[in-house]
Image: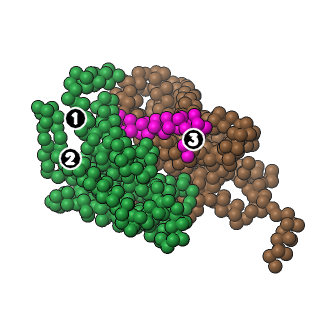
Chain colours: A brown, B green
Amino acid sequence: MSAGPTMSGATRIAVWGLVGALGVAAPFLVPSYLQQIATLWLFVVFALTWDLGGGQMGYNSFGNVVFVGVGMYACAVTQIGLFYSVGAYTAARGGGTEFVFTMPQYLSGLAIGLVAAAVLAVVTALVLGSLVLGMRGHYFAICTLGLGVAGGELAAGWEWIGAGSGMTAPTAPDVLDVNSFYYYLCFVLAVITFFAMRWLLATRFGLAVNAIRDDEDKAEAMGLPTTRLKVTAWMFSGLFLGLAGGIYGNMNRFIDPTDLAFAGSTIGVWMVLMAILGGKGTLWGPVIGAVVFQVFKEVFWTYLLGWQRVALGLLIVLIVVFFPQGILGFLRERFPALFGHTVEAEIAEDAEEAAS
Amino acid sequence: MSGILSNLQILTVAPVFNVQLLIDGLLIGAIFALAAYGMALVWGVMNIINITQGEFVVLGGYVAVEFAHHGIHPLLSLPVAAAFMFIVGWLVYRAAIFRVVDQDLFISLLATFGISILLQQLMNTVFGADVQVANAHMGSWQILGGMVTVSQVKLVSFIICVILGLGLMWFLKSSRLGQAIRATAQNARAARVLGIDTDRVYAMTYAINGAICGVAGALIAMAYTIHPYIGLPYTLRSFMIVIVAGLGNLGAVIVSGIGLGIAENYAGFILGAQFQLAFVFLLLVAVLVVRNWRLQRQRRYLK
């Protein structure tokens, strides 16, 4: 397993403590940026789960956004369907005064909705994964790209869930401080995802997934059930992405089928980019990439309005052309000792002698 | 569901609607095939899957739209669209693509994806987000007792596509540059040893692809509609046609392009127009999955 810099136990606890403390304190430190930081935690989840497939397993997918979309709709539909008719709700465009959720209704709806989101996203990953994970390389990449945009088009044509005009998530009761509530949900999800990935990559499963990336044919010849492993990895991605989608939809209030839920050419590409920017195939890389990317994105959206996507496209090209190894990859090249790559003294001496 | 059944019923009760769908599919399929041929060229020669394909098409369409806005007949825009997109293609190659030619396919995939996002917003800023059309002011014929409409501009665009396809084939076969392109596609290293400037060949290939897309886009703007974010469907259609037809087989490209056009028109009619694009994307997935299954029987896979 290729983790981040090899840290001693004490430093590791210190880093975790620092990040955790910043995360918990953010609503008090920078209340005006709360929504942006909440989105950042979701981006961390997106990048980490993408990296499980793309970085650790070598299956570069543009379609993980499908799980976000499935989770988002599943959660919203469950939340509404528990208490009202979904068709009537979407027909009223989520407005009207008759669709009121009391506090217990809202919270229980959200809890059950998130479970439904996770389950449905995992099932989606199982079904789609069994279909498409057999192909490799760019065929897989383009096939998943097709899956992502197809999901958006299907949702945009389905009247029951609001079709092209989208869906509004239930309105929270006034007593709930929605901003901090969803902020902490996002934060907790990111933390859980991080430790889940950390644990997963340290198990035999993580080693097997890495073996598939390095040489799938050999891994199969050694007796690894590669297809089952690949689908399982996708299901793990689906689990966390489904939860993230459910939270994202509620946080954003308005669910647009192609711009938010199944945003193949925005969020679907961003998660790839975040993982690459930070360093593919590392644990901390996607986290760092998500932070840097979110900062860039917010700056572009604030100061380059109207040109933000031009800047973003340019950023993508620059990163993949000039910086494909990512931030951690760059650091590893420059400061190998930080990552525990040491050269044995004897070999170093021999090499020096040979050089001189 | 009942809508689908009643639409199917219409097709069996009034077979003349089939003629309409077949003709429409045939006419638009040729344009799909043209764009796909450009993609196959870049893929075969440079080993790059050009996600920017659709944006090149749309950009070419805006040349025709601008002509129509200034009162010039959009058919006259075809050479201009080709020349303009040739230059755009060349510039894009010189700016970014040449750095990713030798790299991992995923890198070039992402790089062209980035360029396509950039071009989308650029077009949105310059031309606006509205759906636009380059009005060619041409009528249409009613045949089979007025039940079937054949739009003249679509027929003209079909003929232009066929002529252009044949011209391209001749160009690749006989011209010096065409021969150099084919030699580079076969073995870039050997071509370099034999004195072919492969970098220039790559630049020209990418620029020629731009020109092909430019013409296809201008025809689409005349016969159909364009807007800044419609590029990705054209990219995926091209990709689908190329994987069905294989690289470097013009006849197969035309057949599968027209097949896709017809299938899409039928899907739009039976499932409803709102599901037409969903059908295209799912068809792409289905084509890949089925092809992969067939390969897996021989213990091989799509790669």
Q: Earlier in the sequence, mark 1 or mark 3?
A: 1
Residue B114 at what x, y percent from top left?
47, 56
Residue at the (33%, 51%) spot, across then down: B34
Residue B298 at least partly seen: yes
Q: Which mark is residue B301?
A: 3
- How far apart, in angstroms, are the residues tagged by discs 1 and 3? 39 Å
Q: Which residue is mark 1?
A: B20
Protein chain holding label 1: B
Residue at the (35%, 22%) spot, across then down: B1
When the figure is inspected, residue A152 is found, relative to residue B153, above or below; the finding is above
Give the residues in magenta. Answer: B275-303
Residue at the (76%, 61%) spot, across then down: A338
Q: Is residue A247 left or right of residue B223?
A: right
- Residue A159 in which image quadrant: top left
Q: Disc 1 residue type?
A: Gln
- Residue B23 in which image quadrant: top left
Protein chain holding label 3: B
Residue situated furthest bottom in the rendering: A356
Q: Which residue is mark 2?
A: B155
Residue at the (59%, 54%) spot, across then down: A276
Q: Earlier in the sequence, mark 3 or mark 2?
A: 2
Q: Disc 3 residue type?
A: Tyr
Residue A299 at what x, y percent from top left?
49, 59
Q: Is residue A64 magenta?
A: no
Q: Looking at the image, is mark 1 or mark 3 nearer the viewer?
A: 3
Q: Are the residues under badges 1 and 3 in a single subunit?
A: yes
Q: Are the residues under badges 1 and 2 in a single subunit?
A: yes
Protein chain holding label 2: B
Graded by Cα atoms within 10 Å as few (under 14), some (14 to 19) or many (20 or more), the crowding at tag 2 reads some
Residue A230 at what x, y percent from top left?
63, 38
